[in-house]
Amino acid sequence: MNPPKRECRQCWFHAYEIHKGNWLGLAPRKDCPECLDHLKNGHPDHMIVR
């Protein structure tokens, strides 16, 4: 599955995978630390789908 345009590849993929079965090992309703950092400080430009 490919993320839509203007989405962060990492955050979109993590959200997609968490909803599929949480193979990242996070507790229910928990976000990964890197994605939380993106929400707080912005997504790296090279991770945004163009």
Image: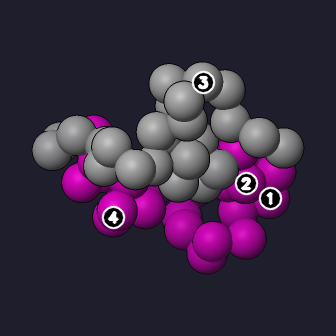
Task: Specify the amino acid type for callout 2.
Answer: Glu
Task: Specify the amino acid type for callout 4.
Answer: Pro
Residue at image point 33% right, 43% down: 45
Between marks 1 and 3 in the image, the one whose residue lies nearer the viewer: 3
Given residues 49 and 30, the one toward you in this image is 49
Residue 11 in magenta stretch? no
- How far apart marks 1 and 4 lie (CA) works out to 18 Å
Residue assigned mark 4: 33
Task: Specify the amino acid type for callout 1.
Answer: Gly
Looking at the rendered structure, the secondary structure element under dot 4 is helix
Disc 3 residue crowd, few under 14, some 14–19, many 20+, Cα 10 Å: few
Residue at image point 73% right, 54% down: 17
Residue assigned mark 3: 5
Name which of mark 2 and mark 4 comes first in the sequence.
2
Total numbered labels placed on residues in the image: 4
Residue assigned mark 2: 17
Given residues 18 and 38, the one toward you in this image is 38
- Which label sits on residue 21? 1
Between marks 1 and 4 in the image, the one whose residue lies nearer the viewer: 4
On the question of residue 39 being in view, the answer is: yes
Please say if 37 is above or below 41.
Answer: below
Name which of mark 1 and mark 3 comes first in the sequence.
3
Query: Quadrant of residue 16 in the image?
Result: top right
Name which of mark 2 and mark 3 comes first in the sequence.
3
Please say if 1 is above or below 22.
Answer: above
Given residues 27 and 10, the one toward you in this image is 10
Range covered by the magenta-colored residues: 15-39
Tags 2 and 3 touching, CB below 8 Å: no
